[in-house]
Amino acid sequence: MVTETRSEQLSGLPPPRQVSFHRTELGVILSLYGRMVAAGEWRDYGISCLHEVAVFSVFRRAAETPLYRIEKRPTLARKQGQYAIIAMNGQVLRRGHDLKTVLRILERKLIRIVE
């Protein structure tokens, strides 16, 4: 729940917007998601658009905790990078400024040795 402070109410400024993924960002993420579903690795996803972060969560089954969270935090855009891949245990696997580069860590799971 977003609440306005008294100074924001008096100044007439609109309340801060929520963070969300852009259409091009979702295209990149859903492309990877489709390949992982076809490989049998992932089964479900969820999207959360919050005040400071947008999260794309990936599940093996719908009733579990997410395997991975793909987060977008615009406040970190000038520092560590606004995109991050976070594992089930909370460990940050990769962080960066370019979404495609950050997602490469998950694409490695698609590469298997064929005998």
Image: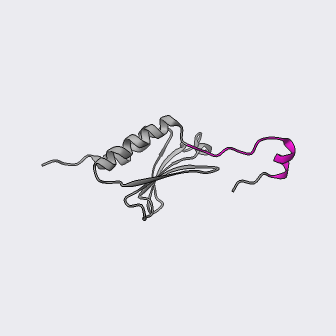
Q: Residue at x 37, y 48 (%)?
A: 106
Residue 102, x across and y down, in percent: 43, 43
Residue 86 relative to residue 51: left or right: left
Seen in the picture, residue 44 relative to 35 is either above or below; the reply is: below
Residue in front for this viewpoint, 62 or 107: 62
| 97 horizontally vs 110: left or right | right
Name, please, the residue furthest toward the right: 10
| Magenta stretch holds residue 2 | no
Identify the residue at horizontal 75%, vertical 54% (top origin): 3
From the image, give the main secondary structure of the stretch colored magenta: loop
Give the residue displayed 59% in from the left and 39% down from the top: 78
Using the rendered view, name the quadrant where residue 29 is placed.
Answer: top left
Image quarter of residue 103: top left
Residue at 44 percent of width and 37 percent of height: 27
**In the displayed image of the protein, which residue is found farthest to the top?**
24
Where is 109 relative to 24, above or below? below
Q: Is residue 8 left or right of residue 27?
A: right
Residue 75, given in percent of the width and then of the height, sits at 62, 44
Q: Which residues are magenta?
A: 5-20
Q: How far across and down, in percent of the image, does residue 19 sit?
A: 61, 45
Nearer to the camera, 77 or 51: 51
Q: The N terminus lies in which quarter of the figure?
A: bottom right
